[in-house]
Image (cartoon, grey):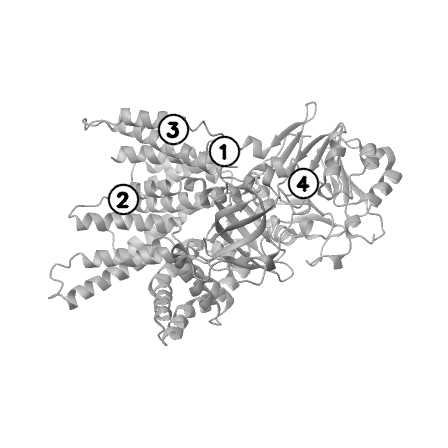
Amino acid sequence: MQSWMIGLVSGIVFGGYWTRLPPWQLSLALVAVALILRPWHSSHSALRLLIAGLACGSALALVSGTLLLDHRITKECVGLPVVVTGTVSSLPRSGEMPGGVIRQRFEFTVDELYPERCAGPQNVMLSYYGDHLIEPGIKWQFEAKLKKPWGLANPGVYNMQAWFAQRGVDAVGSVRNAAKAQQLSASPALTGIPNRLRQRISEHIQDLGLQPDVTSVLRAITVADSSAIDSRLWFLFQQFGLNHLLVISGLHIGMVAGVGYLLGGLFLKIFSPVLSNGSWLPSVLALLLAGLYAALAGFSLPAQRALCMLACFVVASLAGRHSGSARSYLIAASAVLILEPLAAIGSGFWLSFGAVGALLWLACWQRGFGSFTRLLTTQLYMSVLMLPLGAFFFGGGSLAALLANVLMIPLLSIVVVPAALAAVVCFLLGWNIESHVWQLAAWPLGKLLPVAADVAERAGGWLYVPLTANVNEILPSVLAVALFALPGRSVMKPLAVILTLPFLLPINPVMTTAPGSTRVTVLDVGQGTAVVVHSGDRVLLYDTGGGDPNGLNMGSMAALPFLRGQGITRLDTVVISHADLDHSAGLDAVRNALPIDRLRYGGLPAHYSQRMTTGRPCVAGESWHWPGGQTFQFLSPALETPRKRNNNSCVLQLQIGEYRILLAGDIEEHRERLLVRYWGEYLTSEWLLAAHHGSKTSTTPTFLKRVQPQIVVISAGYANRFGHPHFTVSERLQHSDATTLSTATSGALEFYFEPGQRLRIRAYRQTDHRYWM
């Protein structure tokens, strides 16, 4: 049976990484293979069971993938106004947008969608900007514009599209005319009651008047509402290797199950005459309380895994049988993947099951250890394991994880989580003692969080070290960590050291290019711009993408992960074309993380939300050279300050051998005419970054005729609300001799300029495609 489950899990996991889906009819053949190979009588058929499970898993992956794509919104309906009727099916995540506007984002189960030709999506993700409080389980009718679930596609950067695929989201969009939204029911549907309860508890915690960071943590560990955890607080926990404590995981489920088991044992002793045959009570009560807590967590993947393994233990004990850890582990993996076949394309699956697998492996070699020694060795082992895993999934690792976890895990286990859950019970029962219990849960956090922030600030960058690892490095590193767990002086220990070398030796290796060659990467940052020019050990970053300068932005979410993935630890030059946030929002994130030798920006310092304490405005005529022969020169602006901020853009021209590259920022028609008039033939460039994301106010016929580009790149968001690129610009480019490429459809675009060779182009969304993208 275990061989069959290994095959099943493997088949489903591999299915999530297919580049294309085979015809669905193949699933019938796979099921037939499974039935033929399944050994009905032989007990010595592990290989046949493995292959049968693999066929079943592949068939399930194929069927689920086919259904996923069949329900996706069609291309013809993208951006079309539609009317959707259905039920709010998730806990809404509220957040304040720039300008103070409140956005509520939630999943919506569709009952009806008009016009009928657009019907098909069953689960959509909607953003609502209005005055109504959106509550789970309530039926609504909205006017909306929908588009395909989309995510940014960059090398080494998380793709949100994977999360949409895991959740089975068929379309995403925004509610139009929020005032016209109609609430069609007053009471929640039965399926919406758990999420409604979670929302009620989360709002109550918000109203307690505690410190904001403490409130955010309590909301996360009680009802898995992480909407209030901003990037600053998340990174603080990341620096100490404590992010897992912000997610309701097996640790939290285990704590609640332990409380349930102790309560069951206590009831059994008190009511022993009545419960003479009540040996089942502790286990059942543990499972019941763990299930209720998992429901409060929205049945997240780690909660599902922990609950399933606990259920295996309880059922086996009630049946008078032994529940093997390995069997329970495989059953949990099978159950999670059957319920959510694409779970394995996300880091959560690998981190959750990887951590438990590592703990089970370590437990095999800890027999005879004392409790304190077991605790220390376990934390040391997991801290070491998280270095390669953190390098692969997050681009870094914490050097303080061991000490921080030894302190915080017992504190949360003994004080914070039990007190918070007790406070929830008091709140639901209406007991007056509730506020005091909340204070007890909040007190340790209120004392420790400011101290942690102060330590992180004083420590500089040594707490959290940027690390990179690819698959070829992480697999032997994880195997090495497993070998290190072997007791005594095992002959495998020297092999473990050797296996770690691929990971340890190239820490932050600068991936230098060949002498004289240059790589230009236009990152996929949605509706914004970020371009990386890399030659030898020199790197230039032109713009940092959009977002919130004080929160999530493309500097921290796209530019920095890409740069760290290339082993880049220093920037020769950063150019911020102008102050609009879709070009400058990530500046602070970048300059706080990496040293910058030269900073240039367009416009005046007062135009920027960030302080411009270094660098100076770019001025036409300024130029510099790199050792590889590359020449950089600003063509605009001159010493004047145009009225329109867009025309303040730094226009940068690069000379790479015989190629010229023109980065035009957001300049508009008037500035384009001035450039043509002043620079004349010097403006000619084989490669052009279209100005203003393809807006109709830019890329004029006169400008194109003078530049004469062979390649035009448009950096714009998929189905963006501005309509970029404008159809007139698209038509103009189609009638020119230029090849037009767009980050919206191609993802990150990499251009390789090498002496004596033809230009090579890599479109990340095509070369690293998955069927669900």
Residue 436 location, x and y as percent? 39, 75
- Amino acid type of disc 1? Tyr
| Left/right of residue 107 with respect to residue 702 in the rendered view | left
**Gap in angstroms between the C-alphas marked 1 and 2:** 31 Å
Above or below, comparing residue 42 to residue 447 in the picture: above
**Gap in angstroms between the C-alphas marked 4 and 2:** 48 Å
Q: Earlier in the sequence, mark 3 or mark 2?
A: 3
- Amino acid type of disc 4? Ser
Mark 1, residue position:
771
- Amino acid type of disc 2? Ser
**Gap in angstroms between the C-alphas marked 3 and 1:** 16 Å
- Badge 1: how crowded within 10 Å, few (<14), some, or many (20+)? some
Mark 2, residue position:
328
Q: Residue at x 86, y 41 (%)?
A: 673
Q: Earlier in the sequence, mark 4 or mark 2?
A: 2
Residue 526 location, x and y as percent? 62, 44
Name the residue nearer the viewer: 649 or 64.
64
Q: Residue at x 39, y 59 (%)?
A: 193
- Amino acid type of disc 3? Ser
- Confirm whether residue 459 shows in the render: no
Mark 1 or 2: the one toward you: 1
Name the residue nearer the viewer: 740 or 762.
740
Mark 4 touching mark 2, by CB under 8 A?
no
Mark 4 or 1: the one toward you: 1
Q: Earlier in the sequence, mark 1 or mark 2?
A: 2
Q: Secondary structure at mark 4?
A: loop
Image quadrant assignment for residue 516:
top right
Q: Residue at x 32, y 50 (%)?
A: 306
Q: Earlier in the sequence, mark 3 or mark 1?
A: 3
Mark 3, residue position:
27
Q: Earlier in the sequence, mark 4 or mark 1?
A: 4
